[in-house]
Amino acid sequence: MLDVKPQISPDLMTVRILDGGYTYIALYEESYEVYQPFKEAVLSAIANNTAGIVLDLRFNGGGDDNLASCIAGWFAKEPVFYEFVTTYDPGVQKVKITSAACTKPRPQIYEGPVVIMVSPDTISSGEGVPMIMNKTARGKVVSWYGTDGAFGMVTAAAILPLDMEILYPDGASLNENRTIQMDSDASRTGGVAPHVRVPMNEETLARAMAGEDVQLTYAVQALQKQSE
């Protein structure tokens, strides 16, 4: 059993060295506070010629789309379109494109094997990183479940009694063909699905209940196969 488990904590990021010399990075959001330590962790992995990186996004609640694009850029070997941002303009009563983003490789990138872990708690901008990793074929997604499939632009709010506030999307993320991307549709298709779906059965559930991070075990096994 591996000696590293993901930690749900107020920390923005967790970094560990796993058995076999693999670097484990858990990101809980895409923010300016987390970007610099993430950058340092990847640069350290590059300098140490680490055997592989596990990028754990299972508890990532999202954040800034531009930073999600930058984070993916530390693994991308070529530029790839990220999104058109749209919003509803009540003045003209139409949905308008307000900005566009492209993921570009950083001056230094990590070129070794990468495995990404996700879950239904991987939401919004947290889904942008595995989306780009998929588009660039720069990592296997290894998990029980896929991401949430909630990639809309949440900039509107409604004030309710008891000082409650509901945030809701008033725009969408479009791909290069100007089609809504990532959001779940009527067929329940959306988000990022695992390339390697960790089996959920009596054996794996018993291991998980005993304290093992079964998904992480499978992620490391996937890294080992890529290294071979």
Image (tube, grey):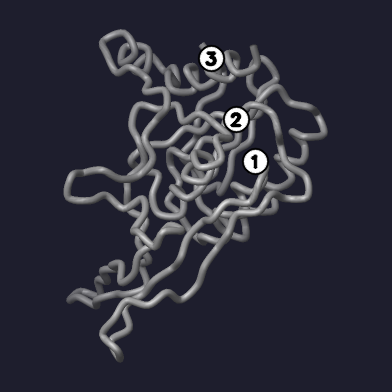
Left or right: 127 in relation to 138: left
Relative side of 115 to 95, left or right: right
Position of residue 165 relative to residue 221, above or below, is below
Residue highlighted by disc 2? 114
> In x, y percent, where is residue 161?
17, 76
> Residue 70 occupies which quadrant of the picture?
bottom right
The quarter of the picture where residue 179 lies is bottom left
Distance from the alpha carbon under mark 2 to that under mark 3: 12 Å
Q: What residue occupies the far bottom of the structure in this picture?
A: 91
Q: Which residue is mark 1?
A: 75
Q: Nearer the viewer, residue 136 or 225?
A: 136
Secondary structure type for disc 1: loop
Measuring 23% from the left and 51% from the top, which residue is drawn there?
A: 185
76 and 205: which is toward the camera: 76
Please name the residue shown 56% across and 58% down the image. 31
Q: Mark 1 or mark 3, which is nearer to you?
A: 1
Residue at mark 3:
221
